[in-house]
Image (tube, helix red, strand yellow):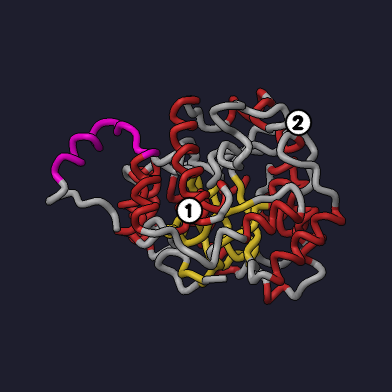
Amino acid sequence: MEYRQLGKSGLKVPELCFGAGTFGAANEFFKAWSETTQEEADRIVGICMDAGLNFFDTADVYSDGSSETALGKALAHHKREDLLISTKSTFRLGKGPNDVGSSRYHLIQSLERSLKRLGTDYVDVYHLHAFDATTPVEETLNTLDQFVREGKVRYIACSNFSGWHLMKSLSVSERYGWARYVGHQAYYSLVGRDYEWELMPLALDQGVGALVWSPLGWGRLTGKIRRETGIPKDSRLNAKVVADSGPQVSEEYLYKVVDAIDEIAKETGKTVPQIALNWVLRRPSVSTVIVGARNEEQLKQNLGAIGWKLTVEQIAKLDAASEVGLAYPYWHQRQFEERNPKPV
């Protein structure tokens, strides 16, 4: 397992991070992904640790807190100092007017509850799950800085921010000398490359490492979807709540990308998801890639994405197949690469 710096911080994280969203399935959305039992969760964490994957990601809203509880129980079998734990807050968890957002009130409440469910005194990386435009950025960052000073959080990060959300936050942290975001948990895959337009150049310029979620394109690059057969009956994409809440991808575009991956699979002897994951791991600004697993076999397959590298020619083939038209002003900037070079 290779370890990388998390952005412009001193923290080293494994190139793969385990996403525990499949643990503790307690509602329709998460049951569509998996219903992992506690016994299975314990075994999966053990396999991760044996492979050098000691970074585990969850969130307070995953199965209404059940994911944190199940992950905490599984991690209790291991030494806390050997683990890296990441969780998140901001989304609504409760019916009250203050049970949502990134206010001081909600973040303090959320962190205390997350620590209790996880069975730990601190988390290594604490994310805002999304930007809250109703709370002053200063209030949010001052609260996060206090968590760091109290020792309840080691590093702070964000998720699903736009470029200006992230840049404004970094500016406020710099102005007051507060803890700054060292990571951005963002969607990025071979069938979802919007991250490259603005967030990637910002990340490289400001030292914010990408923690990539859904690197298999919301379940589209598992190897089960083909032009000839379409989406199989047992796919989570058949669940309306899953399909509607994730990135939208046209069928023809998806099949074009899968066709290119299939060609490289024949050359390398690797699987479709292993190639898709390896491509993301080679991209600029990426600190770690979050992988999930329904079971032990799927986890072992995902672990096969590391320890080897796609060739320059294979990456170029995948880049060409997954390229899409850019939105303004990116298509205009791309015409002048001597002033706006691509990230490397």
Q: How many marks?
A: 2
Which portion, as a residue range, is magenta? 321-336
Q: Are marks 2 and 1 in contact (CB under 8 Å)?
A: no
**Which residue is painted at 71% across and 54% down in the image?**
114
User: Of tags 2 and 1, which is closer to the observer?
Assistant: 1
Which residue is found at the position 50% from the left and 39% from the top? Answer: 132
Name the disc covering residue 242, or none: none
Where residue 150 appears, as percent x and y from the top left, is 60, 68
Residue bearing the label numbered 1:
267
State how far apart marks 2 and 1 are (Cα): 39 Å
Q: Residue at x 47, y 65 (%)?
A: 6
Q: Residues within 10 Å of mark 2 (few under 14, many from 20)?
A: few
The amino acid pointed to by label 1 is Glu
Q: Is residue 270 left or right of residue 119?
A: left
* Residue 197 appears left or right of 99: left
For residue 319, which quarter of the picture? top left
Q: What residue sits right under mark 2 in the picture?
A: 28
Name the residue rendered at 63%, 37% in the picture: 224
